[in-house]
């Protein structure tokens, strides 16, 4: 299992992670990305690579 975290102060709501995630972990809430299905994360790290502000971290539990 993986923990997906977003640093809200770094997130600008660009939706890159929302659009690239193959298992739809993210959704936009109040103009910021939110990992609403973190337990679905496949650890592909495409969200980490796509985030222009380096706001996303994925760690293994």
Image (cartoon, helix red, strand yellow):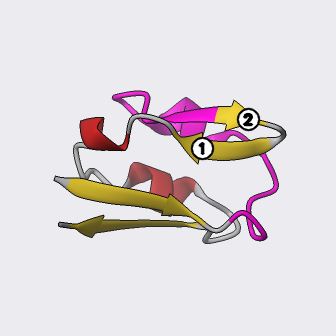
Is 10 part of what is drawn in magenta?
Answer: yes
Residue found at x 57% / y 31%: 19
User: Magenta region, mostly helix, strand or loop?
Assistant: loop
| Residue at which label 2 appears | 29
Q: Residues within 10 Å of mark 1 (few under 14, many from 20)?
A: many
Is 13 part of what is drawn in magenta?
Answer: yes
N-terminal label among 2 and 1: 2
41 vs 60: above or below: above
| Residue at which label 1 appears | 34
Residue 54 percent across, percent down from the top left: 61, 71
Q: Secondary structure at mark 1?
A: strand
Residue 31 relative to residue 34: left or right? right
* Residues tagged 2 and 1 counted as in contact (Cβ below 8 A): yes
Residue 61: which numbered mark, if any? none
Q: Secondary structure at mark 2?
A: strand
Residue 39 percent across, percent down from the top left: 27, 41
Residue found at x 48% / y 61%: 5
Q: Which residues are magenta?
A: 8-27
Residue 26 percent across, percent down from the top left: 52, 36
Residue found at x 64% / y 68%: 7
Residue 33 percent across, percent down from the top left: 66, 45
61 vs 45: above or below: below
Residue 57 relative to residue 14: left or right? left
Quadrant in which residue 58 is drawn: bottom left
């Amino acid at each position: 299992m993986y923990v997906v975290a977003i640093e809200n102060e770094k997130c600008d709501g660009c939706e890159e992670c929302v659009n690239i995630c193959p298992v739809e972990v993210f959704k936009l809430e109040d103009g910021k990305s939110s990992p609403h299905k973190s337990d679905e994360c496949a650890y592909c790290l495409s969200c980490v690579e796509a985030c222009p502000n380096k706001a996303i971290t994925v760690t293994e539990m």
